[in-house]
Amino acid sequence: MTGIYFDNNATTRVDPAVVEAMLPYFTEQFGNPSSMHSFGNKVGLAIKKARMQVQELLGAEHDSEIIFTSCGTESDSTAILSALKAQPERKEIITTTVEHPAILTLCAWLEKDGYKVHYLKVDGKGRLDLDEYKKLLGDQTAVVSVMWANNETGTFFPVVEMAELANAAGAMFHTDAVQAVGKVPLNLKDTKIDMLSVSGHKLHAPKGVGVLYLKRGVRFRPLLRGGHQERGRRAGTENTTSIVGLGKAAEMAMEAMAFENTEVARLRDKLEAGILAKVPRSFVTGNPDDRLPNTSNIAFEFIEGEAILLLLNKFGIAASSGSACTSGSLEPSHVMRAMGIPYTAAHGTVRFSLSRYSTEDEVDRVIAVVPEIIAQLRKLSPYWDGDGPAAEPEKAFAPTYA
Amino acid sequence: MWDYSDKVKEHFFQPRNAGVLEGANGVGDVGSISCGDALRLMLKVEPETDIILDAHFQTFGCGSAIASSSALTEMIKGKTLDEALKVSNQDIADYLDGLPPEKMHCSVMGREALQAAVANYRGEEWSDDHEEGALICKCFAIDAVMIEDTIRANNLSSVQDVTNYTKAGGGCSSCHEGIEEILVKVMSERGESFKPGTPSQEEAKPAGMTNLQRIRKIEAVLESVRPQLKRDGGDIELLDVDGKTIYVSMTGACAGCQMEALTLQGIQQKLMEELKEFIKIVPTKAGALSRASCHV
Ligand SMILES: Cc1ncc(COP(=O)(O)O)c(C=O)c1O
């Protein structure tokens, strides 16, 4: 039995066509794109092509708005730090409680340097309150950073509208679109989004390459200074092979866009409905009406996520969880806590994230296995009693804190 | 994914003594739902002899929490209560051939469930005195609460001091930023400000032992463990001492075996007790001590 990979929000398999496009740039076309000779020249042209492929995917107006970086995290850091450096008189950041650590850890660090960070709350379905946002926006706001889609639940945020509001307040707007790029059509030229982060490995390109989209005219301060690569906005010799791969992956993502939003979404819906129908006391987290087409995050009450993953893994199924144990922290996922999901469910959340390589057969196999696994673990749970939860579970088991 | 021993996996995939125990007369519920680990231990104790006739568990928790619970029930069955109470969390971890540092608290929870269940059987009130914080040092599994308390109790003011007292930060050193943050916080409570580069208490004091005396002591410790290693077909040899780093080579059956890291940890502990200072033991073959894994 081959493994079933339903963890595509963590990372994706590099498409064989992408690998093929990359290979010549390791050996034959190994030159430095900055060099004058013909070894470098062809590589320079390949990067130019990749830049245009990414431009197309993002719907950017100019190819020079595409800056290649080393990863999504670098793009996030570069965007926020640039906005602060470029507007030293503005000392506030607005973001959300459910961002990726690439944003949240950076913000926590900036707070120590005296910046004020406002974290927008979410409701039970992971939605923002735009009135709260409007009240916080002001002439002190340097930058707003809100993700396009949440990596755990797939829930979308109204970033296009939020960018308009930020623009009207004279603040810069950045969005971490790492999970959205390649899965939803983008048309950045018609938006007020100033900066946007992309990570290659989420869209079947290699790990260790990313993009920062920077709208023409937006004031910018580089993070890495040195050579004149990327027009002086990101020094360091280009990761040519990966950039070529990302270009190819962007082109393929354009072609697969409709498929992602019809067929992948159908498989995801089937998986979700199949599991919910067979497993009592389980529910979908986030906003099922407005989310990425490939993501389903299900909470299984009264059991813990790492244990679920270990059993899934035994059946060759790969998924991920928001439990404290899988993140190495003391608390379950900050996203689940922000939505007010109780601990007894938050620790038991499992994220299934599909891709265009997922098959109907895989979905059927997962639907067949999950109910058994959940039942097996619930038999061990002090909250469970025979075929159902103990009467008043929170009272049936109330351990002494240890 | 965690680097679980085969024994942990076995106890997770086929837990022993899981489920409700009918006729239990001692029950202990411990753990923290917010941390995602909680356990109910049920004992059936023979009143005349205090012998644990049967033990069952129910656990809400991760793989190692379930495995630790299962192991605990196996370990205490047939023991008297007093014997059972001698089982330490390290014993539980050892029974499972070790736990990753992030998971040592699962064995602590098992031990506490036992204390709580015995107290319940004896009609006593059990209260927990153990608090757990975020894991700071992954090499030695030291959490923030432990570091904070130690800084407070001993008036520490440098990262080196913290390492000397708790071992935290003595391995890969990537947690030094985290330790500094705790120092800043605790020192500001006592009205001081943290200054990087402050000499540690240790360094400020004149060294208590000459180099020669130290090396002799180290040799003596190695000598004392040698018979045990030889019984397993292995040996250990002192190669060099460089300040607080002691280089050794492991030979024979011990070299590279899964137990090497554990054995070295034990020897390191012994050396620290003898020398009364923090030291690090480094096997010349790379890798044995750096098992603590980083994960995403
Ligand atoms: C929303 C989001 N932002 C940022 C990142 C980080 O991207 P990278 O791994 O390329 O640094 C991820 C990946 O996990 C992500 O999901």
Image (cartoon, coloured by chain):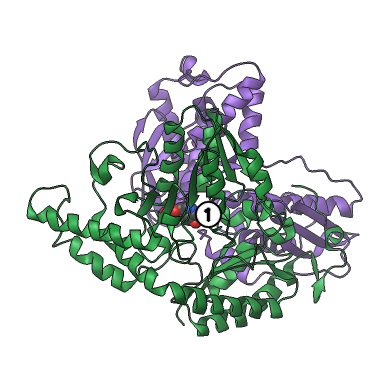
Q: Residue B68: image x %, image y %?
A: 66, 59
Q: Residue at x 59, y 54 (%)?
A: B94
Q: Residue B82: image x %, image y %?
A: 79, 51
Between A46 and B178, the residue placed more toward the observer is A46
Asked whether the viewer can see residue A64, the reply is yes
State the green chain. A
> In the figure, is residue A224 to the left or right of A392?
left
Query: What residue does disc 1 label?
Result: A160
Asked whether the viewer can see residue B290, the reply is no
> In the figure, is residue A320 to the left or right of B53?
left
**Does label 1 point to a residue whose CB lies under 8 Å from ligand 1?**
no
Q: Colour of chain B?
A: purple
Please tell me how many numbered marks the rendered image carries.
1
Q: Quadrant of residue A286?
A: bottom right
Q: Is residue A20 above or below residue B236?
A: below
Q: Quadrant of residue B61?
A: bottom right
Amino acid marked by disc 1? Val
Q: Is residue B53 above or below residue A169?
A: below
Between B162 and A317, the residue placed more toward the observer is A317
Instruction: Tell me the chain of label 1.
Output: A
Q: Residue A125: image x %, image y %?
A: 68, 60
SS at mark 1?
helix
Between B43 and A280, the residue placed more toward the observer is A280
Q: Residue at x 33, y 48 (%)?
A: B285
Between A167 and B216, the residue placed more toward the observer is A167
Q: Residues within 10 Å of mark 1 (few under 14, many from 20)?
A: some
Q: Is residue A332 above or below residue A321?
A: above
Q: Residue B153: image x %, image y %?
A: 66, 24
> In the figure, is residue A117 to the left or right of A102?
right
Q: Is residue B76 above or below residue B224?
A: below
